[in-house]
């Protein structure tokens, strides 16, 4: 756990240094990796001509959730900004979190963007872009719960969203028999409210969103694991990977990514 945290902190430092270094360069200078031509037409091949298809699981506010019929949030805005840079139209496909990697692997989707944590295991199936945000696995309990620290979770029933890093870490640290998997984070939170489970391990931003809209819940002060979010891209599709990384670099340098994060994370 300590190693993961250290690595994440080191990465954050490197990222802010490189962002500072980028400040001096002109904004309209195209980065070397970008495969967008001068007139803004994309030269990169995608699943559907002229379209950037994003696979996500829209139950993860403030990264992706429904507002009426629209999927909104940090990832939706970032994908739109990337698509604009590449001269593509954005289409979002909503699916189970569990299906996103398969959709990217098979080439049905160009981009898996879902508050997805970079892990070594996932790297065996997909490539990841540069990171655009950090997440923290946190623990939700009922107000007044006897669970005050991570250690108190031992032997307790823990709810998680299926196939997320919270699921993987919880099973590793507290045993499979103590972990209940739900298709949606919101379902795990409902199970906590009704007393079926004792705690929920989930990313900090959705945790805050759920606690805000549900009475009687609180987030433990101690963070469980810190991690990096990135977009998943089909393994070996270096043209698309470089194009998206080029767009991301420009969007970091011109402050767009920070603006989008600030819009949703107050
Ligand atoms: N960051 C977590 C993961 O990648 C959860 C992502 C999500 O539920 N959308 O596993």
Image (cartoon, rainbow, N blue to C red):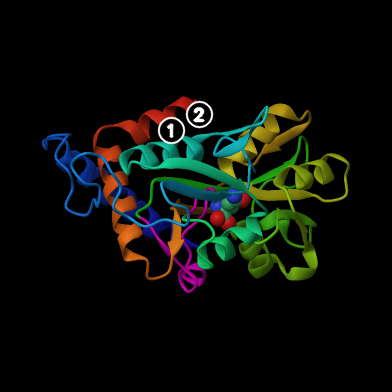
> What is the magenta range?
111-129
**Does any atom of ligand 1 lie closer than 8 Å to the CB of label 1?**
no
Seen in the picture, residue 7 relative to 16 is either above or below; the reply is below
Asked if residue 241 lies left or right of residue 194, the reply is left
Q: Which mark is residue 261?
A: 1
CA–CA distance between discs 1 and 2? 6 Å
Residue depicted at x 33% and y 48%: 12
Asked if residue 199 lies left or right of residue 262, the reply is right
Rendering quarter of residue 63: top right
| Label 1 SS | helix
Residue depicted at x 88% and y 49%: 196
Residue depicted at x 16% and y 52%: 32
Q: Position of residue 123 (x, y in %)?
A: 45, 69
Q: Position of residue 113 (x, y in %)?
A: 50, 49
Q: Pointers 1 and 2 in contact (CB under 8 A)?
A: yes
Q: Which mark is residue 264?
A: 2
Residue 138 can be seen, yes or no = no
Residue 185 highlighted magenta (yes or no): no
Along the line of sight, the residue nearer the viewer: 201 or 235: 235
Rendering quarter of residue 89: top left
Q: Which mark is residue 87?
A: none
Asked if residue 118 lies left or right of residue 167, the reply is left
Along the line of sight, the residue nearer the viewer: 205 or 144: 205
Along the line of sight, the residue nearer the viewer: 226 or 182: 182
Residue 210 can be seen, yes or no = yes
Along the line of sight, the residue nearer the viewer: 142 or 66: 66
């Amino acid at each position: 756990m300590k190693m993961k945290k250290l690595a994440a902190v080191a990465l954050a430092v490197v990222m802010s240094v490189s962002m500072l270094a980028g400040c001096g360069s002109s904004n309209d200078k195209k980065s070397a990796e970008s495969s967008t031509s001068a007139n803004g037409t994309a030269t990169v091949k995608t699943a559907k001509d002229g379209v950037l298809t994003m696979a996500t699981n829209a139950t993860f506010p403030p990264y992706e959730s429904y507002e009426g019929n629209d999927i909104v949030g940090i990832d939706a805005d970032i994908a739109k900004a990337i698509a604009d840079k590449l001269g593509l139209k954005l289409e979002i496909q909503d699916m189970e979190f569990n299906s996103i990697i398969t959709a990217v692997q098979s080439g049905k989707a160009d981009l898996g963007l879902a508050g997805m944590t970079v892990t070594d295991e996932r790297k065996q199936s997909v490539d990841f872009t540069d990171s655009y945000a950090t997440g923290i696995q946190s623990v939700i309990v009922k107000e007044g719960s006897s669970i005050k620290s991570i250690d108190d979770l031992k032997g307790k029933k823990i709810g998680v969203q299926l196939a997320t890093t919270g699921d993987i870490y919880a099973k590793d640290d507290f045993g499979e028999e103590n972990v209940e998997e739900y298709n949606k984070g919101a379902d795990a939170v409902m199970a906590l409210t009704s007393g079926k489970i004792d705690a929920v391990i989930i990313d900090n931003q959705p945790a805050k969103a759920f606690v805000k809209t549900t009475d009687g819940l609180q987030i433990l002060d101690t963070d469980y694991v810190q991690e990096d979010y990135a977009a998943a891209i089909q393994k070996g599709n270096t043209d698309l990977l470089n194009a998206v990384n080029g767009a991301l670099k420009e969007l970091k340098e011109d402050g767009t990514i920070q603006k989008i994060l600030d819009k949703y994370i107050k």
